Image: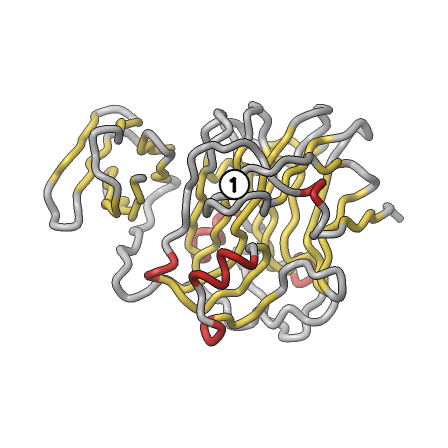
Amino acid sequence: MKKITFLAVATAALLGGNAYAQAEFDFSNAGNYHLIYLDEETLAANVNASDIVSDCRPNDTNSFLYVWDNTYVGVTSTGPNSNGVPGAYINLSVGTVGWSGMGIVNNNGAHFEAIDDTYHFHIALKTMDADSHVIIVGDEDANQVAKFTIGSTPFNDNGTIYEVLQDISRDGEWNAIDVPVADLKAYSVSGLVGYPNPDFTGNIFSMLSGARTGATIGLDAIFFYKPGTNGVEGVKGDNVKIFSTNRTIQVLGGEGIEVYDITGKLVKESKGTIVGTESLAAGIYVAKSGNVVTKVIVR
């Protein structure tokens, strides 16, 4: 059996990074949170207790952050997380074992049975390395799990290929990935993603990062949530993904981008796969590529 090394969530070894720009989550138009990782300060300032359906964040009592065989090591720093709170995110570096894996495991029943296609999965990441990473969400024991690559090329895990969901910038800035649970089904062998068992215990979230010693990845703001009624819902297309960084809006799997403000006015467009956002005021916009429409946030 592979050895599990549990990492105390309060230790400085797991926290921080440099003071790069943030990719803050818009808590004003979301609710019904199922929490996997979120710092207490952000939670207290933005989320009402009545809006937390399930809290499975690592607490070193019945929910734990672990690494397999010490395959990652914690990286110490005190910079802000994706919501601007200093020293409050997971920062891991690949060790020398030859592979790497981590997870957040719940031993007291996740109670995530309410999650369905109306929910979104959210995670913030940052790195300065070119490596791809596999994100795994869902109940693997029930064969209701999505596995996808964050990177420019699919992740090859000893012959098992995990397709790309999205890439992120590689400049050490925070990137937010926000995807409907319905879309995660495209990255599941069974076509199902969910937590149907109210007493489910096991991995809630896990990640693989390959074998290159020193590759570092920061993780923050990991949760499921239900968008509010004022949100702009995405329209699913054939493997087309639109995402924003701190300076651009990009499309993967398609070509041509139109960006509209909340009044419906066209404010940016490109015939290519990327458009700059430096001239746009901070706020919520709607990006369109072909028949795919997605809400994006410009900061």
- Quadrant in the picture for residue 243: top left
Q: How is the image coloured?
A: secondary structure
In the image, 290 versus 270, the foreground residue is 270
Q: Residue furthest right?
A: 1
Q: Is residue 144 left or right of residue 60?
A: left
Where residue 38 sits in the image (x, y, percent)?
A: 55, 55
**Relative to 126, residue 66 above or below:** below
Image coords of residue 242 (percent x, y): 34, 39
Q: How many marks?
A: 1
In depth, the one of 292 and 29 nearer the eye is 29
Task: Judge from the rendering whether residue 143 lies leftward or rightward of residue 264; answer left or right.
Answer: right
Point out the image quarter for the C terminus: top left
Pick the front one: 20 or 223: 20
Dividing the picture into quarters, in which one does residue 254 lie? top left
Task: Write the residue at 54% across / 31% down.
Answer: 18
Q: Which residue is mark 1?
A: 80
User: Dot 1: what SS?
Assistant: loop
Instruction: Give the crowd class for mark 1: few <14, some 14-19, many >=20 residues within 10 Å.
Output: many
Residue at 48% x, 65% y is 33
In the image, residue 285 sits, relative to residue 159, either above or below, namely below
Q: Which residue shows up at 35% across the image and 37% down it?
A: 244
Query: Could you tell me which residue is drawn at 79 percent across and 43 percent down?
Result: 68
Percent of width and height locating residue 69: 83, 40
| 121 relative position to 209: left or right | left
Residue 264 screen position, x and y as percent: 12, 47
Answer with the quarter of the image where residue 131 lies: top right
Q: Amino acid at mark 1?
A: Pro
